[in-house]
């Protein structure tokens, strides 16, 4: 079961990479990750939330020793 | 009532949902961070209308930063290499991350707003593709977390991402790589944040009804 759990995480990570490649290399209507974030950051609430989420990842793994 | 429109945006509900998870985890600090961020967003929205069209940023577009990318890259590499020398969850680690967090909060709270009021209502074509993958990953993480709560003796079979990544960050090199990636992501976000106030970005496509997206390809051609 552990290997299945890890495999799903890996599939998600690969899917993110494939999506970015498709966005850059094809004419499909898929935005790049930068375009997606720039679009999300158009709102103040998202600006604060996304920056907090980024900071919390650092805190979670470095500050709290998760 | 218009100033409470921030509650109809997804950020605060997502943060409050995460608060529930932190209550179950019995992690007071993480709960305080997520709940406090929700409060900051609501208070900040009361200062304006949630989009803060202050008009100061104008048409400024941050350009050329990738040409100068090697300077911050060297800086972040040195930072990661030195900061990784501190032990896991050490006081130095906590101080470094806390100072960076306060600086990031100050930057985001004083970041310029958009000049174009239509921009807040634009739609990015194809965003759903990213959303499906992101939601799937979050649901899988949540599934692992819930499974751990139900069968605590069988945690190894359902690891969360923290359970997989955390043990790898004990030694210097993986910690330095993680720090470099984290600092790089922060720098990238900062660049996007400071350029997001521009009314016209390179590669944006404006249509009559405000659809915005997929124009980055035209910009490269």
Image: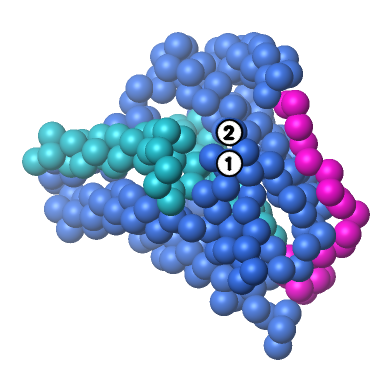
Q: Residues within 10 Å of mark 1 (few under 14, many from 20)?
A: few
Image point 78% across, 63% down: which residue? B116
Per the image, the residue denoted by label 2 is B221
Look at the image and give the colour of chain A: cyan
Q: Is residue B53 magenta?
A: yes
**Image quarter in which the N terminus of chain B is found:** bottom right
Q: Is residue B191 magenta?
A: no
The answer to whether residue B136 is above or below residue B217 is below
Q: Which chain is blue?
A: B
Q: Residue furthest front?
A: B221
User: Which residues lie in the magenta part?
Assistant: B45-65
- The reply to whether residue B74 is in sight is yes
Query: Do the dots labelled 2 and 1 sit on one chain?
Result: yes
Judged from the image, the secondary structure of the residue bearing numbered disc 1 is: helix
Kindly indicate the quadrant of the structure image that contains residue B203: top right
Q: Is A38 on the left or on the right of B170, as rendered?
A: right
The answer to whether residue B40 is above or below residue B153 is below
Q: Is B52 on the left or on the right of B216, as rendered?
A: right
């Amino acid at each position: 079961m552990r290997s299945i759990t890890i495999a799903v995480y890996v599939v998600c990570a690969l899917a993110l990479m494939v999506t970015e490649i498709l966005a850059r290399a094809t004419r499909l209507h898929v935005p790049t990750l930068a375009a997606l974030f720039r679009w999300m950051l158009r709102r103040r609430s998202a600006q604060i939330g996304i920056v907090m989420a980024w900071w919390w990842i650092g805190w979670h793994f470095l500050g709290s020793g998760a | 009532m218009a100033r409470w429109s921030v509650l109809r945006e997804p950020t605060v509900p997502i943060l409050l949902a995460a608060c529930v998870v932190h209550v179950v985890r019995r992690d007071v600090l993480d709960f305080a961070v997520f709940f406090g961020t929700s409060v900051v967003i609501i208070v900040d929205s009361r200062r304006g209308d949630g989009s803060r069209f202050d008009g100061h940023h104008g048409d400024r577009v941050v350009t050329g930063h990738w040409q100068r990318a090697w300077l911050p890259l060297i800086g972040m590499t040195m930072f990661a290499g030195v900061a990784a020398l501190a032990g896991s969850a050490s006081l130095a680690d906590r101080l470094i991350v806390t100072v960076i967090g306060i600086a990031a909060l100050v930057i985001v709270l004083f970041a310029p707003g958009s000049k174009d009021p239509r921009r807040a209502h634009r739609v990015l074509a194809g965003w759903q593709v990213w959303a499906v993958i992101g939601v799937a990953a979050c649901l899988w993480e949540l599934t692992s977390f819930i499974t751990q709560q139900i069968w605590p003796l069988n945690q190894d079979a359902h690891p969360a991402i923290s359970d997989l990544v955390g043990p790898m960050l004990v030694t210097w090199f993986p910690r330095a790589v993680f720090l470099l990636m984290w600092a790089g992501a922060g720098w990238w976000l900062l660049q996007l944040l400071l350029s997001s106030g521009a009314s016209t970005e390179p590669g944006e496509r404006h249509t009559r009804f405000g659809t915005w997206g997929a124009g980055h390809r035209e910009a490269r051609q």
